[in-house]
Amino acid sequence: MKLDEFFVTGEPLVYGGMVSIVLVTSAVIFLLTYFKRWGWLWREWLTTVDHKKIGIMYILSALAMLFRGGMDALMMRIQLAFPNMNFLNAQHYDEIFTTHGTIMIIFMAMPFLIGLMNIIVPLQIGARDFAFPFVNALSFWSFFFGAMLFNISFVIGGSPDAGWTSYTPLSGAAMSPGPGQNFYLMGLQLSGIGTLATGINLMVTILKMRAPGMKLFKMPIFTWSTLVTCFIIIFAFPILTVALALLTIDRIFGSQFFTVTGEGMPMMWANLFWMWGHPEVYIVILPAFGIFSEVIATFARKRLFGYHAMVWSMILIAGLSFLVWVHHFFTMGAGAFVNSVFSVSTMLIAVPTGVKIFNWLATLYKSKIEFTTPMMWSLAFIPSFVLGGVTGVMLGMAAADYQFHNSYFLIAHFHYVLIAGTVFACFAGLEYWYPKMFGHKLNERIGKLAFWFFVIGFHVTFFPQYFVGLDGMPRRVFYIIPEWMPLNVISTVGAFGMGVGFAIFVFNIYYSYRNSEREKTGDSWDGRTLEWATPTPVPFYNFATVPHADKYDAFLDMKEKGETTFEEEKLEPIHMPSNTGQPIIMMAIAAFASFALIFEWITLAVIGLVGVLIMMGIRSFDYDEGYHVEVDEIKRIEREARGL
Amino acid sequence: MRHKRPHLQKWLALLPLSLVFLLSGCSELTVLDPKGPVGQSQKDLIVFSLWFMLGIVVVVFALFAFMVIKYRNRPGRNDKDYDPDLHGNTAIEIVWTVIPLIIVIILSVPTVTTLFDLEKPPESSSDKEPLVIYATSADWKWFFSYPEQDIETVNYLHIPTDRAIEFRLSSADSMAALWIPQLGGQKYNMAGMENTLYLQADEPGTYDGRNGNFNGEGFTEQTFKVHAQEEEEFNDWVQETQDEAPELTQEEYDKLLAPSVMDEQMVFSNTHLEWVDHGTNDGRDYAIKRHRDAYQELLHLENEIKGDDKHE
C-alpha cells in the first residue's frame, strides 16, 4: 500500500483536520513535558481503577466526541443551506452523516451516560467502587481506543460512508471496498466489548453491593434506571457483536452472510442491527429519564411522584424495546400482519412513557421549583420530549410510516427524542453532579445563557424538519430542490445556535474552574440521595462508614437523624484495589490488532491478538489483592475533608 | 431570569397554536396533497393521528405551564400548597395509564385496516386489472419495464390515471426504495426478491419520484418523473413507443447497469426481463458479477446547477 493510499488526500477540510490533530497532539505533549506531568498522568489517570476518575475520563471523551459530532452536523447544515457553494461533494457528505450518527450514538451519548453512572451509581448505593474495578478500567480503555480508531478514519484510510446503520449489501465488500467500513466495524466492536463489560459490571455492583438496608425498591431512581439499562445492554449488545463479526468476516475473509452474491441474506443485517439498535435507543434514554427524575425531585424540593410506577414503566419499556425492531423497516415488505403486530407493540411503548411524563408533572404539583440550570434542562425536556414522543407514535403507525420513512420527518423525530432526552439529560446531569466531581459548581448565569442558546437553537433546527419531511425531503441527500430551501436555512441558523450554546457551556467549565466558589460541604444542592452524604471532593474510598439506608431518599433520612458517613466508632480498615497499567496496555494492543485488521494486514492482526491473549494470561496470574486503608489514615482524610 | 419566566410559559403555550397555523398551510406539503387513493388513505391516517397528538400536546403543555408557573419558588409564597411528601395517588395514576392505552387502541384500528388495504389494489379502480410495471433500481437509476406492453423506460415513468399500478420492486444491486410521495408511501427494492407496491394516480400530472433509501454516492440524483395521463393518452404513448423506440440489447443493458448517474431518459420497445429479472434468485448477482470493480470508483459528484433543472 502506498502512502498516498494510506492517508486521505485531496480534501482541504481533511488537510485542515490533519494539521489540527498534529498541532493539538504536539501541544499536549509539550505541556505535559514542560510541566513534568507525565508521571502524574500515568499514576493518577491512565492506570486508575477508581470509578470516579474513570467516569470523569468517560465524560471528557464524550464532550470531545460531542464536539466532533457537532462539527459534522454543522458541516452538513452548511452544505444544505448553501448547496451551490459545493462545500461538500456527495462522497464527503455521505462520510460526514455516517460519522455524525455513529459518533453521537456510540461515542457520545452512551459514554456520557456511562460516565455519569460510573461516578454516581456507587455513591448512590453506598458502595466503595465497582464490583470489578479492573474490568471497569478495561471497559473505559476499550471505549476510548474504539473511539480513537473510528475517529482516525477521516485522515487515515477514509471514513465509512454507508450510514450509521451500515445497511448491507451497500456496506459489503462488493459495494464499499476499502478500509472505511472496516473502521466502522472494528471501532464499534472494540468499544462494544467495553459497553457489554460495563453492563455486567454495573449490574453486579447494583445487585450485590448496596448499603445495608437498601432494598431494590428503596434504590434511587437513577440507580434503578442504570440497572434496567444494564439488562438491556446485556441482552442487546451480544447481537451487535455477532452482527459486526459476521460482517467483518464477510468483508475481510470473503464469506457470504450479507452479500447479494452467493445466496447471502442482506435483509438479515437490518434485522440484527435493529434487534440491537432499538434497545440501544433505550440504553441512552432510560438513564436520561433517571437523571431527570433525580434533578426534578431535588429542585422541586419534593419526593418523586409514583416511584413504583416509574420503576415498573422502565422495566416495561425495556421489555417492549426488544419487541419493536421491525418498525425501523416497515417498508421492507414483511406484509400487513407482521407490520400490524410491530405497529401496535411500538405504539404501546407510548403508554409507560406517557406515565413517566405525567409522573414528572405530578412531582411538580405542590412543589417548590427552584430554577437552577440543571432544573431548567430537565423542565425543557418535558415539552420538547413530548413533541418527539407524539411524532414517534405517528411513525409507529406503519401505514403512515410508508410516507414518513427515510424522510426528514423521521430525522426531526429522533433528534427530538435523542437531543431533548439524552443530550439535555447529559447537560442536566453534568451540571447537577459537577460539584461532586470537581468541588465547585458551574456558573449559573453562564450556564443559563448556554441553556437558552442550545434549547432555542434546538427547536429552530428541528421543528421545521417535520414540515420539510412532510414535503417529501428524504434524509441523506446532499443538495435539495428550491422549495425546501427556506426551512433548511432556518434549520441551519438553529444548528449554529446550538453550536454557540455548546461553546458557552465549554467556556463555563473553564470560567467556573477559575472563578467559582469552592464547595465547603458535600451537600451542594440540599440533596436527597446518598451521593450527597459524602464529603466533596469525594475520598477515594467514598464512604468512611457505610450508612444503613432503609428509607427511600436515604440521605434525607440521614440528615433528619443527624447521621453522617463518618461514624468514628464504626471505622474499620478499608480494602481498596491497586492501580494497574494492564487495562490500558491490553486495550492498546487490541486497538493495534483492530487497526491491522482494518487494513487487512492479517499477520499483524494475529500478532496483536496473541499480544492480547498474553496480556490476559498475565492478568490471570496477577495476585495483587489490593491494599487496606488504615483507620488512622481514614480519620485524617475525613477530618480534613469535613473541616473537623 | 426568574421574573421573565411566566412570560416564557405563555410563549410555550403558543407553540401548539403555531402548529395549527402551520397545519393550515399544510395542503402545500407534498405528502398532505396526495393525487391518488393510496396517498389519500395515508394522508387520512396522518391527519387522524395528528388530532390526537395535538390534543396530547395541548394537555401536557397546559399542565406543564400550570405547574411551572404556579409552583415556582417565589418570595412570599406560602406553604399551604407545598406538600413535599406527596408521592402517589392510585386513582389518577390509573387514569393517565388508561387514557393513553385507549388512544393507542383507537389509533391501532385504522392503522391495521389501512395496512391490509394497502396490500391490495385500490378499490376505486377495481373494475380494471392493475397495470404491472417492474421497477428495478440499479446504482443510481431506475428501469421501468412494462411486460404486457413490452416496453421499457429509464428514469421516467408513464402511467394511466384511474387505474391501479402494480409495481414489482427489485434491485440490481444495493437496496433502494421506490417513493412517489404524491401517490403514496415507499417500499424497498432489493436484489433477489420482489416486493409489490400498489399505487394509483387520479389526476393527470407530473409527479416527482425518487429512491428513498440511501444507497451510495449517487443516491441524491436517483430521481425520476412520473407522467400520469388519461387512459387514451397513455395508450397513444405506448403505441408510439412500441413503434418508434429502439430495441434494448443485453449488451447495452449491461453497460447501463454499471454504477453511474444518468441524467438522460431512455425508452425501448422491449424489456430487460427477456434475459434477467433481478427480483429472482437467479438474477440477484447479475450486476455485481459484471461490474464488481466499478463499484470502487468514486464519481466525485458535486451539486451542479443542472441538478436543479432536473427537478425543475
Image: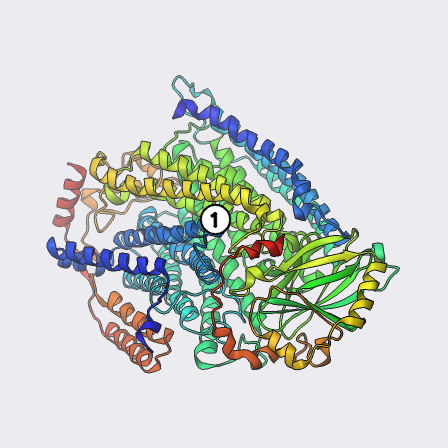
Q: Nearer the viewer, residue B174 or A241?
A: B174
Q: Residue furthest right?
A: B127
* Residue A402 spot, x, y in % from top left: 65, 56
Residue A533 seen anywhere in this rendered image of the structure = no
User: Would residue B24 appear left or right of A255 to someone viewing this image?
Assistant: right
Q: Is residue A194 above or below residue B4?
A: below
Quadrant of the snapshot with the N terminus of chain A: bottom left
Q: Secondary structure at mark 1?
A: loop
Give the image quarter of residue B115.
bottom right
User: Would residue A349 appear left or right of A26 to someone viewing this image?
Assistant: right
* Residue shown at 12% from the left, 57% from the top: A33
Q: Amino acid at mark 1?
A: Phe
* Residue shown at 18% from the left, 38% from the top: A642
Q: Residue furthest front?
A: B244
Q: Chain of mark 1?
A: A
The residue carrying mark 1 is A82
Within 10 Å of the Cα at label 1, are there few (<14), some (14-19), or many (20+) other Cα atoms?
Answer: some
Residue A179 seen anywhere in this rendered image of the structure = yes
